[in-house]
């Protein structure tokens, strides 16, 4: 294995001229982006612009076709990936988590310590069980702890998966469309849980992929806006990125951002 290349940047993720192709189809092109420790960020853009692909690249599940990625100060491809993955959690709403029919919400959260889909062969310590209960409480799931996971609603399952993702105190939390399929109350409960997580001492850096401005947690301090061509349209603080010109360019549809309290929305215009 080549000698690891240290990265002097304090960034949790640092992407330099990253591109990704599937066959002869270009998905991402020349993306330069970084995420600071503890920062709450979002990746926005239309369908097919490479948002989920970008998360999988950051997690080391895919390799870039061009450019380089540093994770926790280490160049991907030059450092043991298993060690880096211990510091992050990746939750995909559209993925199927094949837990068995009898596993409870509490047991699902506990599997986060072992990176498994069962605890049948694991032996959690008293400390890990206590941390499991703390994670359940933080997501307001105490009443559901002993319910079978498969009997929970979509919103309840997503909050369980969020608790599972943070139970081992990762430094980076990657969330791919966590509000997908949720009704408004379920979405608000999930966003409240994310906001509470960000408000803790030493919170993980968080990245949420979404299509919708109203899904942005109030704690969001950085946005990467991608266009149809997989290139960055704009990035930076929400007020600088969420403008009429930027959104219209990215989505190829006239839209006006709205801001009410701590939340964003959009007003569509005729094309």
Image: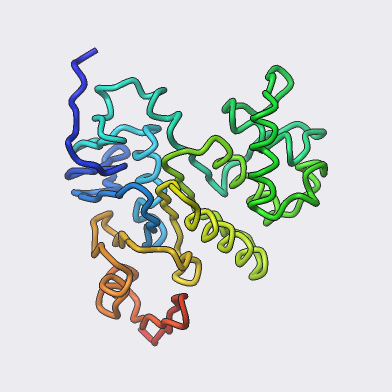
In the image, is 150 to the left or to the right of 200?
Answer: right
Most extreme residue toward the top is 1
Along the line of sight, the residue nearer the viewer: 105 or 102? 105
Q: Is residue 2 above or below residue 58?
A: above
Along the line of sight, the residue nearer the viewer: 179 or 94? 179
The quadrant of the rendering that contains the C terminus is: bottom left
Q: Is residue 57 above or below residue 214?
A: above
Residue drawn at (78%, 38%) of the image: 104
Along the line of sight, the residue nearer the viewer: 150 or 190? 190
Residue drawn at (27%, 41%) of the image: 20
| Picture coordinates of residue 99, whole percent (x, y) | 71, 33
| Picture coordinates of residue 144, whole percent (x, y) | 79, 49
| Picture coordinates of residue 61, whole percent (x, y) | 40, 32
Residue drawn at (44%, 70%) of the image: 213
| Picture coordinates of residue 266, whole percent (x, y) | 43, 79
Residue drawn at (76%, 31%) of the image: 100
Q: Is residue 141 above or below residue 69?
A: below
The quadrant of the rendering that contains the N terminus is: top left
Q: Colour scheme of this structure image?
A: rainbow
Q: Is residue 134 above or below residue 41?
A: above
Residue 192, located in which quarter of the rendered image? bottom right
Along the line of sight, the residue nearer the viewer: 53 or 33? 33
In the image, is 148 to the left or to the right of 38?
Answer: right
Residue 222, located in which quarter of the rendered image? bottom left
In the image, is 91 to the left or to the right of 8?
Answer: right
Q: How many marks?
A: 0
């Amino acid at each position: 294995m080549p000698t690891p290349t240290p990265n002097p940047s304090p960034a949790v993720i640092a992407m330099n001229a990253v591109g990704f192709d599937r066959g002869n189809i270009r998905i991402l092109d020349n993306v330069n982006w970084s995420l600071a420790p503890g920062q709450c960020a979002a990746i926005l853009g239309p369908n097919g612009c490479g948002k989920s692909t970008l998360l999988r690249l950051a997690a080391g599940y895919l390799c870039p076709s061009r450019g380089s990625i540093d994770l926790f100060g280490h160049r991907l491809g030059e450092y043991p990936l298993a060690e880096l993955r211990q510091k992050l959690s990746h939750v995909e709403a559209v993925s199927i988590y094949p837990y068995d029919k009898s596993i409870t919400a509490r047991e699902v959260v506990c599997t986060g310590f072992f990176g498994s889909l069962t605890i049948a062969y694991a032996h959690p310590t008293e400390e890990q069980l206590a941390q499991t209960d703390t994670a359940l409480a933080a997501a307001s799931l105490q009443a559901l702890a002993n319910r079978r996971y498969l009997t929970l609603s979509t919103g309840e399952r997503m909050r369980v998966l969020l608790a599972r993702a943070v139970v081992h105190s990762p430094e980076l939390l990657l969330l791919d469309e966590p509000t997908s399929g949720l009704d408004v109350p379920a979405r608000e409960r999930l966003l409240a849980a994310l906001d509470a997580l960000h408000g803790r001492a030493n919170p993980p850096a968080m990245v949420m992929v979404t299509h919708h401005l109203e899904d942005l947690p109030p704690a969001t301090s950085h946005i990467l806006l991608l266009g149809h061509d997989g290139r960055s349209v704009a990035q930076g603080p929400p007020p600088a990125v969420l403008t009429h010109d930027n959104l219209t360019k990215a989505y190829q549809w006239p839209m006006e951002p709205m801001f009410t309290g701590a939340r964003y929305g959009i007003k569509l215009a005729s094309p």
